[in-house]
Image (tube, rainbow, N blue to C red):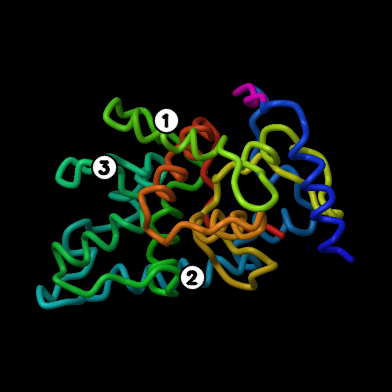
Amino acid sequence: MKIAVCIALLTAMAGAALATEIPRSERRSGYSFMSADSKAMQDDDTANPGMLFVLDGEALWMRKAGAANKACADCHNDARVSMKGVAAHYPAFDKALGKPVDLEGRINLCRTNHQQATPFAYESRELLALTAYVARQSRGMPITAGGDPELAPFVEQGHALFMQRQGQLNLGCTSCHDDNWDKKLAGSAITQGQPTGYPLYRLEWQTLGSLERRLRSCMTGVRAQAYDYGSPELVALELYLMSRARGLPMETPAVRP
């Protein structure tokens, strides 16, 4: 019954007026849509389950790995200093690759190029933990992603993907997160989709998850074929979403329903 209601509501959205971009002055984190209990869980590091991953990430930061027998700390020293503000401007342009790389991708590039180690698998506890630890150092800092002129065509690609209708329900990201935010879908708040806290702990998942996991889940929800983890399309979408959230503070590790 719940699935049928969701489909009916989403189908109704598909016939709504064309998307209107949210004015920058009205952009809000998903945190503002949560219950007081969920907010309290995020705000208290002793209650926030995402902090368990951050602690694991701190241990990984110090652990030597690969044929080079190097730890992240051997190059970057104290993450509280060297990683401060870093996550706030990712995805970032990689000159060697000629394309944007998200934070998970950067960590794996460091593993392969500098540690000579096998890259972590997407959504593995290790990659989520290390990403969360690095991003935690930017908590409270404003998002600055997307400002590099070399990123402009990729931001535009991500914007086009955000607007593109897809799947059997013929919906785009914009159908929910621009046109219908602050409404309800099967009793749950529709947020603006601002990516301020990733990797974040989602109560529905009972674990930490990446922004790419959330994007793939949305695609499955509208009955579309989800892009592969690490695909150029998902990185472009990440880049656009982060640029759309520019100025909002980082919350990693956030908590969401």
Say which amino acid is labelled 1: Glu
User: Mark 1 vs mark 2: which is more N-terminal?
Assistant: 2
Q: Nearer the viewer, residue 178 or 252?
A: 178
Going by the image, does 50 lie left or right of 119?
A: right
Helix, strand or loop at mark 1: helix
User: Mark 2 vs mark 3: which is more N-terminal?
Assistant: 2
Q: Which residues are magenta?
A: 20-24
Counting from the top left corner in percent of width and height, residue 25 is at 64, 22
When the figure is inspected, residue 146 is found, relative to residue 78, above or below; the finding is: above
Name the residue carrying label 2.
53
Helix, strand or loop at mark 2: helix
Counting from the top left corner in percent of width and height, residue 107 is at 29, 60
Q: Nearer the viewer, residue 213 or 135?
A: 213
Say which amino acid is labelled 3: Lys
- Residue at horizontal 76%, vertical 50%? 34
Name the residue carrying label 1.
156
Q: Is residue 129 visible?
A: no
